[in-house]
Amino acid sequence: MRRRRGIEALNRITQGQGRAVIESLADIAPALGDFIIDFSYGDVISRQQLDLKTRELATVAALAALGNAQPQLKVHIHGALNVGASREEIVEILIQTAVYAGFPAAINAVSTARQAFAERN
Amino acid sequence: MRRRRGIEALNRITQGQGRAVIESLADIAPALGDFIIDFSYGDVISRQQLDLKTRELATVAALAALGNAQPQLKVHIHGALNVGASREEIVEILIQTAVYAGFPAAINAVSTARQAFAERN
Amino acid sequence: MRRRRGIEALNRITQGQGRAVIESLADIAPALGDFIIDFSYGDVISRQQLDLKTRELATVAALAALGNAQPQLKVHIHGALNVGASREEIVEILIQTAVYAGFPAAINAVSTARQAFAERN
Amino acid sequence: MRRRRGIEALNRITQGQGRAVIESLADIAPALGDFIIDFSYGDVISRQQLDLKTRELATVAALAALGNAQPQLKVHIHGALNVGASREEIVEILIQTAVYAGFPAAINAVSTARQAFAERN
Amino acid sequence: MRRRRGIEALNRITQGQGRAVIESLADIAPALGDFIIDFSYGDVISRQQLDLKTRELATVAALAALGNAQPQLKVHIHGALNVGASREEIVEILIQTAVYAGFPAAINAVSTARQAFAERN
Amino acid sequence: MRRRRGIEALNRITQGQGRAVIESLADIAPALGDFIIDFSYGDVISRQQLDLKTRELATVAALAALGNAQPQLKVHIHGALNVGASREEIVEILIQTAVYAGFPAAINAVSTARQAFAERN
């Protein structure tokens, strides 16, 4: 149940990218991959209290502010686009990062967004 | 122009709380207060590329993830409520913090939300 | 199953303190409390690949390094003591924090340890 | 030698405050206090490659940016003043924190400066 | 006015490198580039309360401590050199990072300095 | 004395890798290399209050949680293996990082572990 719900949310948001992350964990930390599917996507991200687009934009905001999670930021920039956010909205979230976490975090997040956008063109 | 736009955005979002922060800076760092109004609120937060509710929820997500900005997190939990977010949506953002920044960050953010909610009752 | 395993691990490690944290979440974020029991304690912390004492000392090391999770650090200093670590071992972990995360993080962690130790005397 | 040099630097910069920190560590982590004197002050801070005022202003900048070391930030705001920095220079460093680490870090650092300044009045 | 003052400060400190950063933002986040010039350099960094060399050394200290802003650290190591700091002073700031943010932050900052120094040889 | 003790601890734990780090610092920051040997390894890490395996596992936990010290994390994953920890125990520490510092930190730490393990095969 959690597993199926998790896989559905993972597929809908990351369209294959998240699955690749899970598979890359299979060699040395398969339990971590299971927890990502069952807990992160099955328990938390598939909750109905927030629409998926707002959820993904908030995730982008959190990862940009943290500043040391660029691979995950890229996955969720794709994720936000996959569930209906526009590039303009994502960039706006990243610009706002300058206010709360400083310009270096914002600049580095925009670099990651540039890569993500390029992958979709 | 930036000043007026900043004050309007500050008032609309924080309904007096942000003004109190600005005034508390007036004794030793008035320029920082000016920058908050003119730059943070006048230049960035009043941009139209994102609706205010999504903007505030993203701010809550970023501050909760950073984990060392509890006073500002409280201001923006109020801010999110002031521009139309529900308590349920805010709590949902904070629960999601556990996935991206760990359970301690999520638990501490919920403590701050409890204080903010209590102040409004 | 996860629930029962989680409650057992929570009780064994935190001896009531963790339960108080869960209950404090019940008013506005009960799902977060459930996730702490079911996922953190039921899925992860009760895994058998590491003895509980090493697990708790590693948790103390991580929370001390993060530096913005003092309430959780206190819970796990108690937790480490509850599962067999000595005060001397815990202090040693905290001193080592100076090497990896700097002296301020180490000093603040020792302050938290002082409080935890005093609560047990 | 390191000990004497460390105590001299500690006294010159913190004028008793640092000594109080060392003494507060004596009950449970005396080795950490020794390392602060011998290594931090005796080995590093008393090096001659940088004048003390620049060194203390750089320390204030680093601690303000980290954001979770307010007690140490207060000690070094006093330290910077003790070795010749002006309040205006310190506030300027803290305002600049907004650019590199975001406005919350800057605002919280100014709050700490307000306390330090009040203690000297 | 802010724009001209910002461009002058940017040019003086970064001698072209900062301009390259601004231009790299022009495709997807031109507003962020404007904010860097007008706010960061025009409003904050060109303030007169601190000499430029102390300002840049403090910036180097803050970015080294944060630890996840290596591209910006490199820009400001160049910046500090451009406004009169010596390599020895910069290295001294980075060594001191070990005390406040831990040895990994100091070691990684020295690696970035090595790259910056090599670019100037 | 500190020097000899430091070199012995460095050699035992890092088996040459740490020595390479020290040598890489010799060109621009030799004092930092000395401090790593004399203070980090000679003063702190060679203390007897904790067995080396627990010490290294705690170091791995701290570095994984910090999230911006991947080169050092790799050195200490090797270090933990060199002093008797199993790959399974290290992976377990890294999985637990998800609970305290979030899934991105855990996933990135597992990537670093994969590289370290591959270097030993």
Image (cartoon, coloured by chain):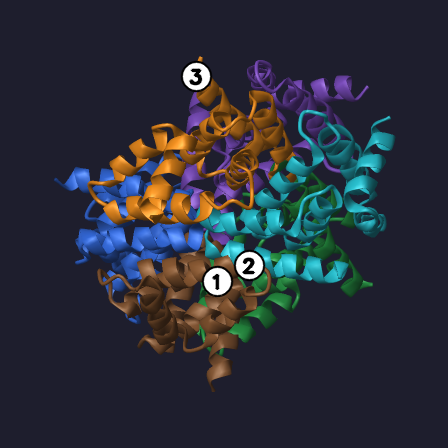
Chain colours: A blue, B brown, C green, D cyan, E orange, F purple
Image side of residue B90 versus residue C90, left or right: left
Give the CA distance from mark 1 to mark 2: 7 Å
CB under 8 Å between discs 1 and 3: no
Question: What residue do we see at 68% from left, 44% from top?
Answer: D85
Return the x and y of residue A87 as percentages of the image width and height.
Answer: 19, 51
User: Which image quarter: residue A104?
Assistant: top left
Answer above or below: position of D59 versus C6.
above
> Can you identify the residue that label 3 sits on?
E120
> Can you identify the residue that label 1 sits on?
B33
- Pair 3/2: label in front: 2
Q: Tell me the number on the disc at residue B29.
A: 2
- Pair 1/3: label in front: 1
CB under 8 Å between discs 1 and 2: yes
Answer above or below: position of E110 versus B24.
above
Residue at the front extreme of this rendering: E1
Return the x and y of residue F112 as percentages of the image width and height.
Answer: 44, 32
Q: Dot 2 falls on which chain?
A: B
Q: Of the residues shown, which amino acid type is indicated by label 1? A: Gly
Question: What residue do we see at 57% from left, 36% from top?
Answer: E54
Image side of residue B29 versus residue E21, left or right: right
